[in-house]
Image (cartoon, rainbow, N blue to C red):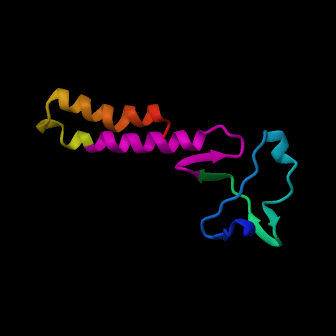
Amino acid sequence: MEPNRLKLNAEKTQFTCLGTRYQLAKIDGSNLLVNGSAVDLLRTVTCLDVTLDQELTFADNITRLTSRRFHYLRQLRSIRRILTTDTIITLVNALVVSRIGAGI
C-alpha cells in the first residue's frame, strides 16, 4: 500500500479468510499478522454494501437484504389508505423489486 501512497485505516479495514468449512477449520485462531500488526479475522465483512461470509454463502447478505425490504413494505402499509392501487404497485416495484434485481 505504501508505494501507492495509501494508508491502512484500522477502523474501516476488515479481514476474513474465504474457503470451504473444511479449509477454514485448518486456520489457527482468529488473528492474522499483516505488516507486523495483528488484525482480527471476521466471520463476515462488508464490501460495496454486500455482506460476504467466509464460505461465500451470502446468507447474512440475504438476511440483511430481506430485512431492509420488509422495512420498506411496513412503511408503505402505514400510508396505503391514501394511495391508489397503481401507486402502491409502482412504489413496491421501485423500493423492493428493483433492489432485489440489482442484488443489493
Left or right of residue 98, residue 26 in this image: right
- Residue 33 higher or lower than 83, as above or below: below
Q: Quadrant of the N terminus?
A: bottom right
Residue placed at 86% from the left, 56% from the top?
28
- Residue 34 higher or lower than 18, as above or below: below
Res. 76 image quadrant: top left
Residue placed at 79% from the left, 70% from the top?
38
Q: Which segment is the magenta one?
A: 47-75
Residue 60 painted magenta: yes
Q: Residue furthest left?
A: 82
Res. 39 image quadrant: bottom right
Left or right of residue 51, residue 27 in this image: right
Left or right of residue 94, residue 14 in this image: right
Left or right of residue 79, residue 27 in this image: right
**Residue 62 % position (x, y):** 53, 39
**Residue 77 % position (x, y):** 24, 39
Q: 3 or 67: which is nearer to us? A: 3
Residue placed at 21% from the left, 43% from the top?
78
Residue 27 painted magenta: no
How many marks are shown on the rendered structure? 0
**Residue 81 % position (x, y):** 13, 36
Residue placed at 68% from the left, 70% from the top?
5
**Residue 67 % position (x, y):** 44, 43
